[in-house]
Amino acid sequence: MLEKLETGRAGATQVHREASIGSREYDLATYATEAIDELADKLSGEEQCLHAKPANTPGSER
């Protein structure tokens, strides 16, 4: 299930990057990303489980 949320988050992030700041699309993409993050955190029990971690940090692999 987390993989599907990660896919949805990637899509919302892409919309967020491409939308004009302050536009309805930008705001909705922000809302979607935050909602996906909150759901993933609840399901996994790990805060910010979908956030990218630096590659050079020990334990950064998923």
Image (spheres, grey):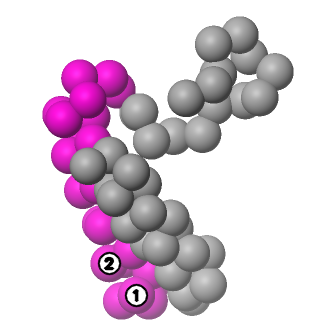
Q: Is residue 58 magenta?
A: no
Tell me the element at label 2.
Answer: helix
- Locate residue 56, reporting x and y percent: 81, 21
Residue at (38%, 66%) from the top-left corner? 8
Residue type for callout 1: Glu
- Locate residue 47, reporting x and y percent: 34, 26
Mark 1 vs 2: CB contact within 8 A: yes
Question: Residue at label 2?
Answer: 28
Highlighted range, magenta: 22-47
Judge whether 58 appears above or below 27 on screen.
Answer: above
Q: Is the stretch drawn in magenta largely helix, strand or loop?
A: helix
Tell me the element at label 1.
Answer: helix
State the residue in front, 19 or 54: 54
Judge whether 42 appears above or below 27 on screen.
Answer: above
Residue 16 in view in this figure: no
The C terminus: image quadrant: top right
- Locate residue 51, reporting x and y percent: 51, 40
Residue at (19%, 35%) from the top-left corner? 43
Question: Residue at label 1?
Answer: 25
Residue type for callout 2: Leu
Q: Locate residue 3 relative to residue 61 in the image: left or right.
A: left
Residue 28 in view in this figure: yes
Judge whether 56 appears above or below 32 on screen.
Answer: above
